[in-house]
Amino acid sequence: MTSTIRTAINRVVFLQASVLFGVLLCWRTAYADPVLVDAEWLSKRLDDPSVVLVDMAADGTQYQRFHLPGAVYLPYQALVQRRRDGVMLRVGDERLLKILGALGIRADSHVVVYDDIGGLQAGRLLWELERIGHRRVSVLDGGLVQWILDGRKVVATPVRPTPVNYVRAHTGGRDNEASLEAVKAGDDGHKPVLLDVRSKEEYQGDPKSKQRSGHIPGATWWPWDQSVDFDNGFRLKSPEALEKSLATVGVVDKQQPIITYCRTGHRASQSYFTLRRLGYDKVRVYDGSMVEYERDRLAPLKLGLTP
């Protein structure tokens, strides 16, 4: 084979590889939807049939009064169930898929979820969808509060979605759920960062309390609500401010395994969403959180404000 022919063949192979790479890059980009979107972004896509807007306002009657145009309503309580011992956990996957289908959500839908309390409700659905491998999900920054402050349109007519059959993708979702055993034993021999996102009073515990209280030994206190700028439309604080706050408690490596917990997994889901928005890739939620942990009499607890 002459050098000229060999050069021509190599050039063709290179071009084919370049085209394939471009196709793959475009495919990945098409599904690289941001974890957080703002009102301006959403306002341009309200008529996009691929977007399913989900309202998770804390008060169910709020949706009846007014909500974003086209939004379907999902109460937080639909995503959790109580065990016989009182521990609140997520619903099973079969139940979750039925909920998604009832809302008109398909596996290729871009789900945009919002609430009226700084992502406290919306973060839960984002966590669930990422767990089952749903690729396209975003939280609306500031939710209903910022939308109204911007003077944007709201409606009162409830949306009755057309049910669909949600078919879960064969590809796996994120490994974003931590068990009691994982919290106590660490992560593959490497102790994860434990973030307790409850209130100061809950974290330090009450030595006079008859019940077990305090925090998991080694857990750092980083309350969920300090991530929200309540004076600025209930939006998340800037990435710079959040990363500076996390650095003060030693969280700087975005590849470091992190487990968030609170009392029932509710607030921990909002912190999960916050960390995901910042680019932290190995975040998990301890869904059972302190309600489950405190019931294990062999699980140690620590009082005070030090990890």
Image (spheres, rainbow, N blue to C red):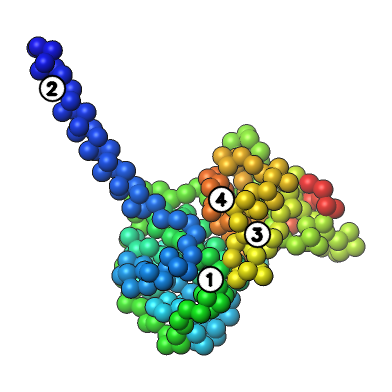
Please indicate whether residue 214 sits to the left or right of residue 69 in the image: right
Which residue is label 3 attached to? 227
The residue carrying pointer 4 sits among few (fewer than 14), some (14 to 19) or many (20 or more) residues within 10 Å by Cα, namely: some
Amino acid under disc 1: Gly
Coordinates of residue 282 in the picture (x, y in percent): 55, 44
Q: CA distance from mark 4 to mark 3?
A: 11 Å
Q: Which residue is denoted by mark 1 in the rendering?
A: 143
Crowd band around label 1 with a 10 angstrom C-alpha radius: few (<14), some (14–19), many (20+): many
Callout 4 secondary element: loop
- Within 10 Å of disc 2 (Cα), the crowding (few <14, some 14-19, many 20+) is few
Q: The disc labelled 4 sits on which kind of residue?
A: Leu
Query: Mark 3 or mark 1, which is nearer the start of the sequence?
Result: 1
Q: Nearer the viewer, residue 280 or 59?
A: 280
Q: Earlier in the sequence, mark 2 or mark 1?
A: 2
Identify the amino acid type marked 2: Ala
Residue at 60% x, 56% y is 238
Which of 95/58 is in front? 58
Q: Measure how far apart labels 2 and 1 are at the Cα level.
A: 56 Å
Residue at figure coordinates x 55%, y 57% from the top left:
273
SS class, disc 2: helix
For residue 278, the mark is 4
Residue at left 82%, top 56%? 204
| First-in-chain label (4 vs 3) | 3
